[in-house]
């Protein structure tokens, strides 16, 4: 069967100017429609300047929308640079793009993403606005630090126990105060009258 006959029976093209980006840790592979440029597959390094060069190239050939997989956290700078350039960027779920066997290279991955996106077969994952995304990152980091608090306190208590400075059984003069006082500092060079460990847990 000829290629012309195959194209007539293929899926209809929804997005005429769609691109697909295969995200990697060191470089990204971009695929665009073959009728827009002589070299429809390009490789860009993962540095910011190269990602900006990718955005300029996509705009220069008339790309309007870009699809990529949510690969780790490597997609975040690519998403932000392309979105800032005015492109419509979607992050697709990897489970929806890896169900077809036979893709063995980054080039094939990028071309497959481009084909699926051009046919309108990819659903965009939810991505909040810049302000909400920044606030969410701060809140998640704060929650992670609070989760680490108990473990770090236990590490300090264990180290103080090794130095015979655990302070267990010493009553704090203020109700509800979780500080522990020691008659002398376990740290050489400390000239204060007493050494205090103050926990953040209230």
Image (cartoon, rainbow, N blue to C red):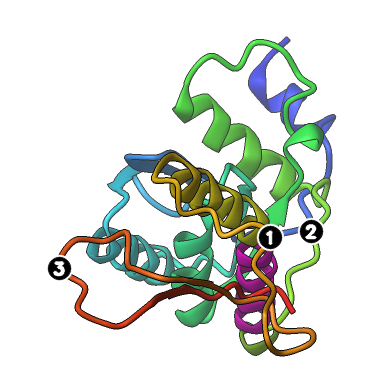
- Tag of residue 125: 2
Res 200 quadrant in image? bottom right
Magenta stretch contains residue 141: yes
Q: Position of residue 75 (x, y in %)?
A: 52, 53
Res 201 quadrant in image? bottom right
Identify the secondary structure beneath mark 2: loop
Residue visible at 75% across and 23% down? 6
136 to 151, vertically: above or below: below
Among all residues in the image, which is located at the extreme left?
A: 189
- Tag of residue 45: none
190 to 94, vertically: above or below: below
Sequence order check: which comes first, mark 2 or mark 3? Answer: 2
- Tag of residue 189: 3
Disc 1/disc 3 C-alpha distance (Å): 26 Å
Q: Which residues are magenta?
A: 133-146
Left or right: where 200 falls relative to 81:
right
Residue visible at 53% across and 14% down? 104
Mark 1, residue position:
169
- 14 or 25: which is nearer to us? 25
Sequence order check: which comes first, mark 2 or mark 1? Answer: 2
């Amino acid at each position: 069967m000829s290629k012309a006959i195959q194209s007539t029976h293929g899926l209809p093209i929804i997005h005429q100017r769609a691109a697909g980006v295969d995200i990697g840790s060191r470089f990204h592979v971009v695929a665009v429609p073959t009728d827009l440029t002589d070299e429809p597959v390009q490789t860009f390094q993962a540095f910011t300047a190269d990602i900006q060069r990718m955005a300029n190239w996509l705009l220069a050939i008339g790309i309007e929308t870009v699809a990529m997989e949510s690969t780790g956290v490597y997609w975040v700078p690519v998403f932000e640079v392309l979105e800032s350039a005015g492109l419509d960027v979607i992050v697709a779920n990897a489970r929806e793009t890896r169900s077809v066997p036979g893709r063995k290279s980054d080039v094939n991955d990028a071309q497959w993403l481009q084909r699926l996106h051009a046919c309108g077969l990819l659903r965009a994952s939810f991505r909040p606005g810049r302000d909400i995304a920044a606030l969410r990152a701060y809140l998640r980091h704060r929650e992670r630090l609070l989760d680490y608090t108990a473990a770090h306190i236990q590490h300090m208590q264990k180290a103080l126990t090794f130095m015979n400075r655990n302070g267990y059984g010493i009553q704090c003069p203020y109700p509800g105060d979780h500080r522990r006082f020691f008659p002398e500092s376990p740290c050489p060079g400390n000239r204060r009258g007493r050494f205090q460990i103050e926990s953040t847990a209230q």
